[in-house]
Amino acid sequence: MKQFGVIGYPIEHSLSPILHQEIYNQLNISASYDKKKVTRDQLDHFVNTNKLNGFNVTIPHKKTIIPFLKSLDPSAKTIGAVNCVYKSKGYNTDWIGFLKTISNNDLSINNKSCVIIGAGGVARAIAYGLIRKGIKSISIKNRTIKSKQKLLEWIDSLHPTNNLNENPNIIINCTPLGMWPKINSMPDIEINNQSTLIETVYNPLETKWLKYGKEIGAKTISGLDMFIWQGIASIELWMGEKISEKIELEKVKKVLKSELC
């Protein structure tokens, strides 16, 4: 039996084992997937001694794990964050999961303008995906000016024609605002019925921000989609084959929704 897992600290909240086990069951793969509580001080030891066939990485280790890996996939190196490891090589499947999400929701981003709320690792992965897919411009809304400026400079290095736009077509929340248990918090940003709101928070299934967007007529996309697709992309790396066409996506969603508030 193959063994996989996810590391983080804290890690109790993760639904990754439920996601992965459902996919393994659908594919008749003999595999297990467990949560591993790993502190920053334990990272080096874990990377060098674990017997897993592959593992995911969640907060707060997506950047700090990099020095302990043997190599990085080009996209992970560019983004500067890792959420998937296979044979001591770091990968980033967050941006792949994001692009699959917008594709599955029939959202065209070519030549559109967007604003990303937040400036962490997920924000960088999504910005990378947007640039790869032909976004016109990306602006950043973040609490700290320093982090915002650093991210904007990085975006400009990849996308020199980027022009800031005060009226974005697409708004993407890459912060924990609205995440369980603090479900009453939401991004402070102006939206209207022409906006498309994309959430990266998947618990609760529909955040207060998405509910408000839906009420005023905006298009909304749940964070559950990206969570599922980044997981599928990780499994494809570990298994060395495409599995997305073999998965009953609605069945996966149903299983996860039963666990969400």
Image (tube, grey):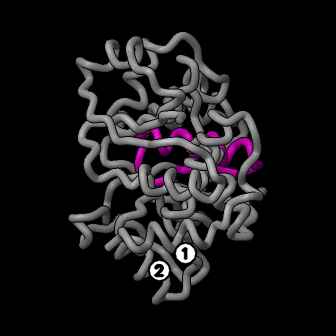
Quarter-of-image position of residue 245: bottom right
Q: Residues within 10 Å of mark 1 (few under 14, many from 20)?
A: many
Which mark lies nearer to you, 2 or 1?
A: 1
Q: Nearer the viewer, residue 111 or 229?
A: 229
Q: Nearer the viewer, residue 216 or 198?
A: 198
Mark sitting on residue 103: none
Q: Amino acid at mark 2?
A: Gly
Q: Nearer the viewer, residue 250 or 194?
A: 250
Residue 3: image location, x then y, percent: 48, 34
Q: Amino acid at mark 1?
A: Thr
Q: Is residue 243 visible?
A: yes
Q: Residues within 10 Å of mark 2 (few under 14, many from 20)?
A: many
Q: Relative to 167, does residue 8 appear above or below in the rendering?
A: above
Q: Is residue 115 visible?
A: no
Residue at 47% x, 80% y is: 213
Report how far apart the C-alphas of labels 2 and 1 lie in the structure.
7 Å
Secondary structure category for the residue under label 2: helix
Q: Which residue is mark 2?
A: 213
Residue at 57% x, 25% y is: 86
In screen coordinates, is 205 left or right of 194? left
Q: Which portion, as a residue range, is magenta?
A: 116-139
Q: Which residue is mark 1?
A: 220
Residue 153: image location, x then y, percent: 54, 31
Q: Nearer the viewer, residue 188 or 252?
A: 252
Q: Relative to 144, does residue 110 appear above or below in the rendering?
A: below
Secondary structure category for the residue under label 1: strand
Label 2 vs 1, first from the N-terminus = 2
Residue at 59% x, 40% y is: 234
Residue at 55% x, 24% y is: 90
Q: Is 158 a magenta residue?
A: no
